[in-house]
Amino acid sequence: MTPPPGPVLVKICGLSTPETLDAALDAGADLIGLVHFPRSPRHVDLAAGAALSRRAAGRAGRVALLVDPDDALLDAVTALLDPDWIQLHGREDPARVAAVRARTGRPVMKALGIAEAADLARIPAYAEVAERILLDAKPPPGAALPGGNGHAFDWTLITRAGLAPGFMLSGGLTPATVAEAIAVTGARAVDVSSGVEIRPGEKDPARIRAFVAAARAGSRKSESAD
Ligand SMILES: O=C(O)c1ccccc1NCC(=O)[C@H](O)[C@H](O)COP(=O)(O)O
C-alpha cells in the first residue's frame, strides 16, 4: 500500500468513554480504536462500542479491534458498530484475513508482532490480503494481552529492512518518543494506547492532545528532511 503524502495518520486506540473519545476527535485523531476483547482494560462491549462508534461517525475512521474473532462476532460487530476498519490482533493467518475482508466488506488492518528482523518476513503475505499492516511490539513472554502492552520494539529493524512506508507503527509510543519514531522509521501512520493513559484503560485527554501534536510536528520535520 503506497501511503498518501502529507501529515502522518494518527490512531488513538482503546478509547472507552465518550469524554476521552471526544478528546481524541477534538485533537484531530484520524482513526479511533475500539477494543472488543474482554481481557483488555480497554474492552468495550458491543452496546458501548456501538454508542462510541456512532459518536465518532464522520469525525474519524472507526477501527473495531478484535482478536481471533469467529464469524458470529464479526457479523455482530459489523452490524452494531459499523466500523470503517477491522483490526485483527490475534493469530489470524493470511487466509483468515482474506476471509474476514470478504465476509465483512470492511478494510482490514492486520497487526504483526515484531521483536527481531526475522519477524518482518511475514509482512508480504499479509500485505497481499490486508489494506494496512500494523507493526506492533511482539508481546513479552507471559503477557496477558496480544497488544496494548506499552512496549516498543527496535525501530531500526524497519530502517535496516528498507521497508516501504505503508505500515502503521505501533508499540510503546508516547508523546515524547513519537517524533523520533517517525524520524527513524519514516512511518506515515502511528498508533498508541498505553502512552496516552494515566493507568491501564484510563486515557488522558492532555496526553492524547500531546501525542497528536507531537506526531504531526514529527511528520512535518520528517517531510522537510526528505
Ligand atoms: O489495547 C489493548 O488493550 C489491546 C488488547 C488486545 C489486543 C490488542 C490491543 N491493542 C491493540 C492496539 O492497536 C494498540 O494500540 C497497540 O498494541 C499499541 O499499544 P501500546 O503499546 O499500549 O501503545
Image (cartoon, rainbow, N blue to C red):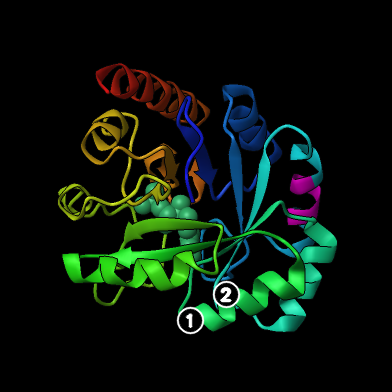
Query: In what element is the residue under mark 1?
Result: loop
- Say left or right for 21 vs 79: left
Q: Position of residue 84 (x, y in %)?
A: 71, 51
- Cβ of mark 2 under 8 Å from ligand 1: the answer is no
- Say left or right for 48 vs 79: left
Question: How many marks overall?
Answer: 2
**Up/down of 151 relative to 93, above or below:** above
- The residue lying toward the viewer, choosing from 84 and 225, is 225
As shown in the figure, which amino acid type bears the numbered disc 1? Asp
Mark 1 lies on residue: 93
- Say left or right for 110 vs 70: left
- The residue lying toward the viewer, choosing from 118 and 181, is 118
Question: Which residues make up the magenta segment?
Answer: 49-53
Q: Dividing the picture into quarters, in which one does residue 121 lie?
A: bottom left
The label number, if any, that marks residue 97 in the structure image: 2
Whether residue 185 is in magenta: the answer is: no
Q: Position of residue 149 (x, y in %)?
A: 35, 58
Residue at the extreme right: 79
Q: Dividing the picture into quarters, in which one does residue 104 lie?
A: bottom right
Packing grade of label 2 (10 A; few <14, some 14-19, many >=20) is many
Q: Position of residue 163 (x, y in %)?
A: 28, 52
- Say left or right for 134 vs 186: right
**Up/down of 167 relative to 138, above or below:** above
> Cβ–Cβ below 8 Å for labels 1 and 2?
yes
